[in-house]
Amino acid sequence: MVNMLDNTIGKAQKTHDQSLKTFLAFATASAAILGLGFIAYIFLKLRFPEY
């Protein structure tokens, strides 16, 4: 199991030259979009509770 994890960790960096900085930027942007969607859902649910 550990051997399999060792083989897959860093695979994106090796094959696509993706740095940690790039990955963190992508993850942050994804989290922000998810958060905005969640806030919009809560707002709409409070504004129109009958739906």
Image (cartoon, rainbow, N blue to C red):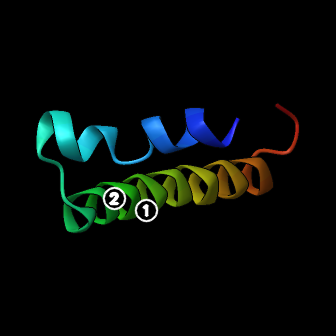
Identified at 17% across, 33% down, the residue is 15
- Quote the CA–CA distance across marks 1 and 2: 5 Å
Looking at the image, is 11 positioned above or below residue 37?
above
Residue 16 pos. (x, y %):
14, 36
Residue 11 pos. (x, y %): 32, 38
x 52%, y 51%: residue? 34
Query: What is the quadrant of the C terminus in the image?
Result: top right
Query: What residue lies at 61% left-to-right and 60% top-to-bottom?
Result: 39
Most foreground residue, 1 or 13: 1
Q: Work out which quarter of the rendered image holds the N terminus and state it.
A: top right
**Between residues 48 and 42, which one lies in front from this camera angle?**
42
Do tag 1 and tag 2 residues touch (Cβ < 8 Å)?
Answer: yes
- The image quadrant of residue 21 is bottom left
Amino acid type indicated by mark 2: Ala
Quarter residue 12 falls in: top left
| In this rendering, position of residue 2 left or right of residue 35 | right
For this orientation, the residue located farthest to the left is 17
Give amino acid for label 1.
Ala
Whether residue 33 sits left or right of residue 49 in the image: it is left
What numbered label is drawn on residue 32?
1
In this picture, residue 47 sits left or right of residue 40: right
Q: Which residue is mark 2?
A: 29
